[in-house]
Amino acid sequence: MSVTKVQTIALLMAGAAGVISIPATWAKDDPAIVIDLPAQTLDQSLRTVASSAGWEIYMSASDIEGIAAAPLKGNLTPIEAIGRLLKTTDLEAKIVDGAVIIRSKSISDENSRDIITVTGSRITGAPPSAPVRVITAEDMRRGGQADLGEVIRSSPVNFGGGQNPGVGTSQGNSDVNVNGSSSPNLLGLGPNATLTLLNGNRLSYTGLNSAVDISAIPATAVDRVEIITDGASAIYGADAVAGVVNVILKRDYEGVSALARVGGSTDGGNFQQQYNLTGGAKWARGGILAVLDHSSNSDIAASSRSYAKSMATDSSLYPRLGRDSALISLFQDIGSRLKTNVDLMYKDGRQDVIAGFLEGQPHTASGAAVRADTRSWLVAPSLTASLGASWNVHLLSSFGADKSQTHSDIFAGGSVYGASYRQYDNDAQSIELNADGPLFSLPAGEVRVALGGGYRRTGIELTTTTLGVTSNAFKQHSENGFGFAELLVPILSPAQNSRLGRALRLTGAFRYEANSGTDSVALPKLGIVYEPFDGLAIKGSWGRSFRLPTLYQRYGSYSAVLYQTARYATGFPADSTMIILGGANADLKPEKSERLCLRRDQGAAICQYRLYLALQPPG
């Protein structure tokens, strides 16, 4: 899908186990298929049936965890198959716009109007025009992944290099990793070209290049991670050039669980430890989830690997890392029309890296021992009001900061002769008000719209000092005001039994954003979903996205270097020289992209992707 798709699911209580709430047209029109499922976990069986029907499926890991499904065979419609799978459970299902939602029946219809956020659109029930890849909590557990950095690196659409621990600390200004963070990097376009969200809210950047540390979010608090590799700036704004990663937290968690994990490398080093405590409770109209997580690993030194014999024995092939994280997610209904939610998060992280040769090595040696400390926090309150007539209003806000400091002891000739210090203090605030609901009805269904606007501010304070000399120091921020609109127009629906096809839906979006210090942008997006017959969906999308230049790229250090002209050009005197200007430039313009894609559901995509760089040369 493309940026955030919000589905409001009112689950109809059947009152008896195994009854499924579905529209009559689905039960009548869906053909029977051959079902042959072995005994396995319930989520595996449900996913298989949903896939055979061409449906997306959404379910909470806490609802289905540990439930086994008996073998199931026969000629059944997908609805009949799901009914039999859920017959002996306290779960029910609802089919909405080509998606099946599995939820506990213990929540009454009055109190079950939770908004299920799905990355794709701001319109309730809008079909995705681009596929969403979902990594569930169960997928993470089976993969043995300790944090969300490992989770995102496991996705084939994410580039595992760049800003991640162990890759290095100087991969270039777009990927430089100063504090051992892990940042999504969809399609390899750079961490600052991927928009990372928590429950649809923005987080503070980390380091110096507008990247988000996804490993700050405790993995045990996560219900699923939704990934879209489609330009989504028309709905979400800046950074969504390569796509969006939306981390969805667990809801309705009850009980207490503890986790302990230890491990290591057989050749030495990388001794890993993780200790986690997760608890949750529910009451009549609310609930809470709380997580404490500690993880650490020792470094891998060059001396412990035979392939690194040419390196200094003390050099770090992989850094020593430590992380303490805490998260609280609290939700409460106020009456029947108002819902509140607040997410709180804190992280204290450490990284130690040794580069080069230290004491005990030849006297010609040099190097550095670098210690990085990071503290980050987030407060994200939200409010949803139901206005009636299927209209909802959402107030979203987030306030966060990330403060990273590094200290380096610089060695030469086997002893310390100086030190360097770096400070990267980021902060971010955002607030948004949006509403969605129906405008009028067509034969194929309701024409629906979403409208919204808001304000966003990001800032950074950077200081660079080496051997007592400050070479880079600035404190800057940028402000962004925006407004957007999105439209869904159904042309065909399954209930019409049209010879032209089973379903046809069109979507459109437009966003205008005014950015301080750079150009304003106007961004369109169009989408189409066509189902000629049951089981085949053809999806197309076209849109434009943008990425703002980072504050470091605009206000960081600036230098002029003298070179011999003969190195770059001919026809000049042999002793002539030239000046090359490099570094930051306050006049940089937004980077823009255009993407056109045509894809078949669960099939390969044919995409044309273009980037436009609007850069102002130094004056």
Image: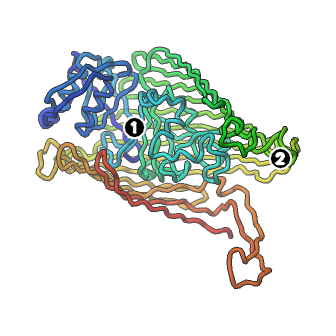
Amino acid, disc 2 = Ala
Category of crowding for the residue at label 2, using alpha-carbon neighbours closer than 10 angstroms: few (below 14), some (14–19), many (at least 20): some
* Circle 1: residue type: Val
- Give the camera-side residue of 189 and 208: 189
Q: Is residue 571 above or below residue 472?
A: below
Q: According to the image, label 1 marks what residue?
A: 134
Q: Viewer-proximal residue, 35 or 405?
A: 35
Tag 1 secondary structure: strand
- Where residue 162 sits: x, y (%)? 58, 47
Mark number displayed over residue 365: 2
Name the residue rendered at 65%, 45% in the picture: 168
- Mark 1 or 2: the one toward you: 2
Q: Position of residue 231 (x, y in %)?
A: 43, 53
Query: Could you tell me residue 436's position as x and y percent?
Result: 35, 42
> Can residue 526 be seen in the rendering of this structure?
no
Nearer to the camera, 298 or 310: 310
Q: How is the image coloured?
A: rainbow
The residue at the point 78 percent across, 80 percent down is 576
Q: Dot 1, how many residues are within 10 Å of its Cα: few (below 14), some (14-19), or many (20+)?
A: many
Q: Are marks 1 and 2 in contact (CB under 8 Å)?
A: no
Q: How many marks?
A: 2
